[in-house]
Image (tube, grey):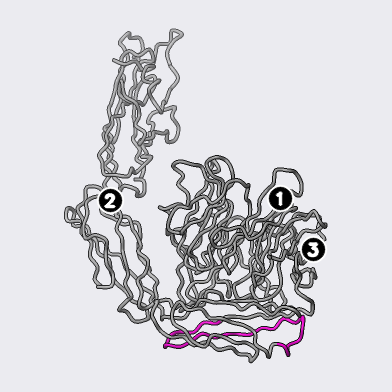
């Protein structure tokens, strides 16, 4: 027989009671005046414990076993040669020093597959030296079932009439199952009709033959082995077809000796039909392409009547695209004619009059302005033509501006406030007044910001994937993206067609790839959300390298993605490729840090030199990656952007030729 002390070394729970005998007074259970050995007894109730649970479900309730004993101690442990299984935990309930004693049996996990587990727990009492031992065994069984289930309770799809919604994937759960899947509507199709055990199931909603409106269906899964049936309600939001312009804001800039460059805007409709569009301006000083079909370019340019407009005053106009029975879209046009001649080289080197390092740079899409966050609670406005610097607004005391973003039509400026409330500050550029802030939805600040517009719905997304309607400020509900407040993406970039958002998320080792999230919107109510899109196809294969991506930008037509990142050799390189696949390295001889893409296809890359201060610079490449120009003798660059009309390069950083924080450089 195993001794009591031997069992104590095996037990996870021990209840020891003090020895009673000695000193000539006899021992416990010894009859007075007699030498008969004591009688040790032990009973346990219940004599067995049974647990049951669903895999991945809630833990079963704990159960108590009561031990009534007459002995010099009580020990609870496992059988000789065995250990307590990881799925079972034992603990004392109440006082462990007297009989009866209660021991609580608790299950620690529900597992992930169907299984039956068993163990035996031994209760022991008797003499403390290990003799005259009495034992009782309690059989413990744990049955885990894994019935048919799915990882969603409902499904929502969004599409334009005449198109198909992006395929959604759900996980069918359950082991030891043999299931079938059916849909009760012809527009809802499945990637497979049956399966065994767990696995993915693709679901597609087809609006090619549906009218605009809300349609419903039911997905039904049935397990032929257990007769389990699961139904998933499906809602399909189908929006009317509409015209979409590739840019909802353009800037036309002229000088006394140089007319404004024409602005090109690509016009498409969401369904991709060959309908004809018509364009018209609300002012007489603008000429526009009068008509076209899906994919044609709308050209906007000032005409001779623009000469009658006042110099150095911003003029705002609207161009409307309509026709073909489709919903219309608009382009907001800003026109500015300077009373000065166009500069031949450097336009301005501007001192922002701050002792702190500027943090954020944004370009107004309809005005000749740049906006700079100063790493304090202040945002400065810079006129890129006149060089005038002014304070746009001052945020709450203690706020620290991280990033600044301007909406595509130039109506609002958004600034992330870090080291403070974490809210997103908002400024109405038309009214020249602060607007209500966007209250944080997570427990921390969100430095990164990106503005995106899809199917006419503008959204603002933070580095925590908080999603807001960019006009109303209404908080949206993200779908299948991190919303715990701890996940924070270092860099966000929206595809110019509004279809996707790329997010850079470094791991603990500093390696990073860019995950893609599809932007879904509902024009009927102005809501939007995000769903994972290209997670399975990272931009850079991490199996053979440890990329460190800094920034991403898309080409004007969203055909390519440009990336500044570190390659496997440890040098920072520039990558370029299609959004659907890995990128190819363009150059690795420079240490690139910042990236900017113009609407005309030019790309600007800031680089760090190796010859000390003022050896940094910026390369400007064309659409074929050919070198257009190099700007040198810069340092401490924090951002690179093209002006709204692509005529200038705006660099947040210092120049050797003159003191200053913002360089406005004329592109040859």
Instruction: Determine whether the residue tagged by mark 3 lies in a helix, strand or loop.
Output: strand
Q: Which residues are magenta?
A: 307-330
- Which residue: 30% across, 79% down? 209
Q: Is residue 312 magenta?
A: yes
Q: Secondary structure at mark 1?
A: strand
Q: Which residue is mark 2?
A: 198
Residue 394 lies in the magenta-colored region: no
Q: Position of residue 118 (x, y in %)?
A: 27, 34
- In the picture, measured across the screen, residue 88 lies left or right of residue 297, that is left
Q: Secondary structure at mark 2?
A: loop
* Image quadrant in which you'd find residue 256: bottom right
Q: Nearer the viewer, mark 3 or mark 1?
A: 1
Tally the marks: 3
What residue does disc 1 label?
616
Name the residue at 33% across, 9% down.
Answer: 34
The residue beneath circle 3 is 350
């Amino acid at each position: 027989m195993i001794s009591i002390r031997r069992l104590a070394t095996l037990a996870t729970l021990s209840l020891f009671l003090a020895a009673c005998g000695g000193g000539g007074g006899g021992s416990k259970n010894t009859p007075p005046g007699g030498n008969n050995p004591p009688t040790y007894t032990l009973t346990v109730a219940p004599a067995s414990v049974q647990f049951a649970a669903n895999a991945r479900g809630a833990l079963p309730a704990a159960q108590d076993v009561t031990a009534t004993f007459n002995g010099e101690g009580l020990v609870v442990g496992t059988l000789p040669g065995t250990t307590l299984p990881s799925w079972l935990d034992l603990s004392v309930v109440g006082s462990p020093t007297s009989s009866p004693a209660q021991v609580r049996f608790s299950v620690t996990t529900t597992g992930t597959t169907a299984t039956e587990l068993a163990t035996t727990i031994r209760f022991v009492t008797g003499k403390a030296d290990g003799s005259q031992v009495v034992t009782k065994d309690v059989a413990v069984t744990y049955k885990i079932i894994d019935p048919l289930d799915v990882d969603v309770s409902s499904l929502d799809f969004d599409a334009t009439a005449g198109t198909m919604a992006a395929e959604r994937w759900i996980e069918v759960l359950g082991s030891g199952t043999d299931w079938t899947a059916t849909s009760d509507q012809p527009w809802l199709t499945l990637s497979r009709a049956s399966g065994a055990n767990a696995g993915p199931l693709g679901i597609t909603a087809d609006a090619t033959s549906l009218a605009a409106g809300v349609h419903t269906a039911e997905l039904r899964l049935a397990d032929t082995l257990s007769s389990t049936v699961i139904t998933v309600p499906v809602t399909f939001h189908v929006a009317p077809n509409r015209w979409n312009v590739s840019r909802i804001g353009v800037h036309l800039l002229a000088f006394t000796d140089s007319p404004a460059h024409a602005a090109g805007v690509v016009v498409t409709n969401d369904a991709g039909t060959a309908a004809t569009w018509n364009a018209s301006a609300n002012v007489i000083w603008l000429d526009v392409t009068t008509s076209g079909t899906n994919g044609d370019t709308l050209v906007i340019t000032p005409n001779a009547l623009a000469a009658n407009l006042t110099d150095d005053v911003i003029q705002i106009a609207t161009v409307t695209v309509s026709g073909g029975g489709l919903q219309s879209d608009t382009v907001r046009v800003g026109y500015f004619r300077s009373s000065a001649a166009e500069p031949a080289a450097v336009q301005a080197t501007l001192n922002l009059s701050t002792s702190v390092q500027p943090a954020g740079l944004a370009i107004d899409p309809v005005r000749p302005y740049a906006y700079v966050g100063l790493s304090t609670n202040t945002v400065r406005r810079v006129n890129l033509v006149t060089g005038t610097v002014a304070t746009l607004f001052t945020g709450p005391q203690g706020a620290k501006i991280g990033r600044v973003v301007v909406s595509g039509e130039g109506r609002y400026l958004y600034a992330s406030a870090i080291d403070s409330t974490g809210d997103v500050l908002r400024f109405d550029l038309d009214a020249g007044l602060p607007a209500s802030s966007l209250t944080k939805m997570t427990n921390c600040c969100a430095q990164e910001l990106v503005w995106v517009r899809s199917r006419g719905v503008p959204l603002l997304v933070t580095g925590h994937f908080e999603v807001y309607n960019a006009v109303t400020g209404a908080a949206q509900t993200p779908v299948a993206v991190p919303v715990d407040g701890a996940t924070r993406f270092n860099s966000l970039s929206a595809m110019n067609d509004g279809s996707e958002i790329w997010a850079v998320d470094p791991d603990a080792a500093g390696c990073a790839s860019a995950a893609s999230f599809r932007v879904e919107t509902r024009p009927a109510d102005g809501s939007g959300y995000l769903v994972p899109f290209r997670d399975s196809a990272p931009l850079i294969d991490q199996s053979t390298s440890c990329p460190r991506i800094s920034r991403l930008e898309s080409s004007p037509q969203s055909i390519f993605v440009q990336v500044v990142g570190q390659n496997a050799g440890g040098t920072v390189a520039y990558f370029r490729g299609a959004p659907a696949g890995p990128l190819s390295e363009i150059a690795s001889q420079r240490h690139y840090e910042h990236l900017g893409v113009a609407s005309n296809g030019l790309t600007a890359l800031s680089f760090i030199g190796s010859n000390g201060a003022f050896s940094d610079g910026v390369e400007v490449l064309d659409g074929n990656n050919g070198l257009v120009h190099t700007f040198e003798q810069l340092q401490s660059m924090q951002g690179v952007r093209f002006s709204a009309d692509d005529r200038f390069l705006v660099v947040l950083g210092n120049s050797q030729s003159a003191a200053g924080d913002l360089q406005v450089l004329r592109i040859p």
